[in-house]
Image (cartoon, helix red, strand yellow):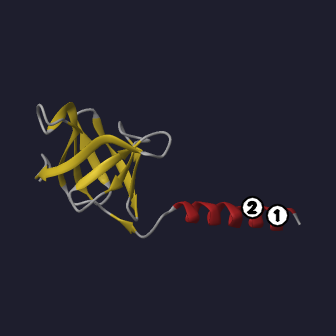
Amino acid sequence: MVARLAFLAALVALASTASLAEGRLGTLESGRYLCELPGDASGLASIPIQDGWFDIINASSYASGSGSGTYLLTGKTVVFTRGPMKGMTFKRMGARSLKAINAEGELAKMRCVRSGRGAAD
């Protein structure tokens, strides 16, 4: 009986984890992503974030000035799962653009755009 309850609990946990994944697993295009904030009409179109960059190396690995780690792309949601960016979440807006998601689950102002080849390329 205890084994059956443990099995059912594991199935429920697996089902709830699977429902969090909003689509198929994927990977980001390798290269350097530069992060910026929007500017305004009276000045710069965008304001680069100092040290706000990361390189997608291969598969689900990234590197930044602070170290390296891994990320998970499910559907259009990117979650950094290990390393210095752990916990950061983005929505994929296109093949080369990510928009940050804040703690409330809303789109934030920061975006990261693939600018070209990273240091690992």
Which x, y percent locates residue 81?
A: 43, 47
What residue is at 23 percent from the left and 62 percent from the top? 95
- Residue type at mark 2 is Ala
Q: Nearer the viewer, residue 35 or 51?
A: 35
Q: Residues within 10 Å of mark 2 (few under 14, many from 20)?
A: few
Work out how far the residue at label 2 is from the one at label 1, CA to CA, in angstroms: 6 Å
Q: Which mark is residue 5?
A: 1
Q: Residues within 10 Å of mark 1 (few under 14, many from 20)?
A: few
Q: Nearer the viewer, residue 21 or 39?
A: 39
Q: Secondary structure at mark 1?
A: helix
- Labelled pair 2, 1 in contact (Cβ < 8 Å): yes
Quarter of the picture containing the N terminus is bottom right
What residue is at 36 percent from the left and 54 percent from the top? 91
Left or right of 78 in this view: 51: left
Which x, y percent locates residue 61?
A: 30, 52
- Residue type at mark 1 is Leu
Q: Secondary structure at mark 2?
A: helix
Number of marks: 2
Which x, y percent locates residue 112?
A: 24, 46
Q: Which mark is residue 9?
A: 2
Q: Which mark is residue 62?
A: none
Q: Residue furthest top?
A: 50
- Residue 8 picture quarter: bottom right
Which x, y percent locates residue 3?
A: 82, 65
What residue is at 41 percent from the left and 44 percent from the top? 82
Q: Nearer the viewer, residue 52 or 103?
A: 103
What residue is at 78 percent from the left and 61 percent from the top? 6
Q: Residue furthest front?
A: 42
Location of residue 80 with respect to 96 vertically, above or below: above
